[in-house]
Each structure stands twice: as C-alpha cells, then as structure tokens.
Image (tube, rainbow, N blue to C red):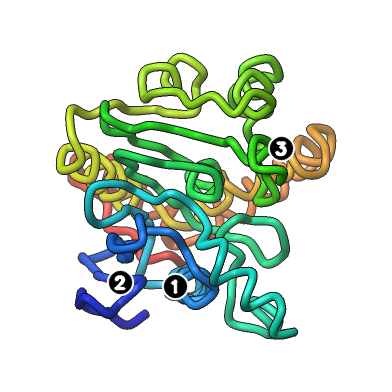
Amino acid sequence: MADIPYSPQTKITVERRGQIVLIGINRPYMDNRLDPEATESLARAYYDYDQDSSLRAAVLFGYGERFSRGIDVDATKAFAQSGKKLMDGPGFIDPMGRTKPTLTKPLVVAVHGDTWNMAHELFLVADIRVASEDTDFGQDEDTHGRFPGGGATVRFPREAGWGNAMRYILTGDHWGAKEAFRMGTVQELAPNREAALAKAIEIANKIAACGPLGTKASLASSHMALEQSETAALAKLGEQYLALLKTHDFQEGRAAEAQKRPPVYEGR
C-alpha cells in the first residue's frame, strides 16, 4: 500500500506508520463531504490496506473542523445521472460495508465535530470508535425525504439498541459524544480532535503488536456470529483454533512468554 501524501487537492490521504496506516478524509472546503471520487479513493484505500500483509491496523480520521457531514449530494446526483457505476470492478472495499468483499483486518476511527449521515455510517463500520467531546452526530436523512442508505438501519440498532437508534433516525435529532458513549457506539472519549486521533493511533498500535492471524480469526468469528448465526460461529471455533496452533506465530507467542520478552509476530 503506497502513501498518498497530503495536499490541498488530495481527497483521501494515506500515511503508513510502521504496521499501521492512517487514512484521512480531506475535503474541508466541502465539510469533508464525500463525492464519488473520494468514495472510490476511500474504497481503494480500504482494499489496499486489507491486501497488504505488512499492515495490521488502520485509522480513519478527518482533516479540518469536522470529521465529515456525509455525502456530497449534488456531486453524487450528477454522477448517478451520468449512468456510471460506483466502485465498478475489482480493487474496492465498500467503505459502508454493504457488499462483499469487506474488511478482514481491524479499523479504528477517530471522529470530531460534525459526523453526519454517511459519515456516521462510516463510523459505525469501524471496529473501535474514538470521539472528541465536541462531536455532533446526526442521522437525519428522514427529515430530508431520504433514509439512511449506507448501513445505519442495520448497524445503529445493533450497536446502540433499537430504541436508542430509532430515537435519532426517526426524529432526525442530533446527539453528542457523551450520548454516543452511553449508547455504546463510542468506546473512548477524548477532549479534542488531536487527542482523539492520538488515542486511535495508540489503540491501532496495540492491535498491531498482537498476532495478526489471531486478530483476523477473532474478527472473522465475530462477523460470522453476526452475519450468519451464533451456531455457525460456534461450530467453526475448533477448526479455527487448531489452525492457529500450527502457526509460527503461536510458537513465537509461547516462546516470548517463556523468555519474558515481547513477541515478534510475522503473520505465518
């Protein structure tokens, strides 16, 4: 996965930091709203991250005063009227997680300021979520004659509980970081944007220090329980566990524990 350095013209930035990668939304002049080009760039970044065996965790964040106000409606409408298809072909992972393939490696998100609609749906896709105390969440498509089409109707009730999710989806009311923490959609609160990003990076580095095969197996098992059934996930556990016992990383973990040193996992 190659770096995509920051510039005023770059809509999605990519910065490798050892075994983690930072992916940034960079359209502050448009409230970080994602147009089709930015959405495809983000989808390509997710795919490249997932395919790169040297990377073990990713952090999504936004530049400027807000994480994102969601979709660039005018640009998306024009794109739809052109007859083109978004993310058409291989090499993409839908950032809203609506279609296969999906991410098989961990995603941490750091949000701040306005985090509305499609942006909240990007947030819900992440495995671990950090929010600045100034975050203003919104899922108010119903008030605009639309509905949350990026996955919130599925993930928000699952993560926050039915009543909590419907309270905000059906009214269009916004809510803050402390309310999100109460509902369980936020795992860590931070005093400001910089602290939120720093905490997300800290968490990503802790994930990267773990065995990547075990991390992927943990995610795969948990997703199977959600997307298929708990019965299917439970039935698969033995096979998954035995497979890990045969790996180099398992032996390295045992050796490191015996030698009282940090393990150095290689993903094999």
Q: CA distance from mark 1 to mark 2?
A: 8 Å
Local SS, label 2: strand
Task: Let me know if residue 21 appears in the view.
Answer: no
> In this figure, which residue is indicated by the disc labeled 2?
14
- The kind of residue on which mark 2 rests is Val
Quarter-of-image position of residue 36: bottom right
Select label 2 or label 3 by which is in front. Answer: 3
- The kind of residue on which mark 3 rests is Thr
Residue at left offset 55%, top offset 50%: 118
Q: In the image, residue 84 lies at what x, y percent?
A: 70, 85
Residue at left offset 53%, top offset 54%: 216
Quarter-of-image position of residue 80: bottom right
- Quadrant (top left, top right, bottom left, bottom right) of the N terminus: bottom left
The answer to the question of whether label 1 and label 2 lie on touching residues, with beta carbons closer than 8 A, is: yes
| Disc 3 residue crowd, few under 14, some 14–19, many 20+, Cα 10 Å | some
- Of the residues under marks 1 and 2, which one precedes in the sequence? 2
| Disc 1 residue crowd, few under 14, some 14–19, many 20+, Cα 10 Å | many
User: Is 203 positioned to the left or the right of 248 in the image?
Assistant: left
Which mark, residue 45? Answer: 1
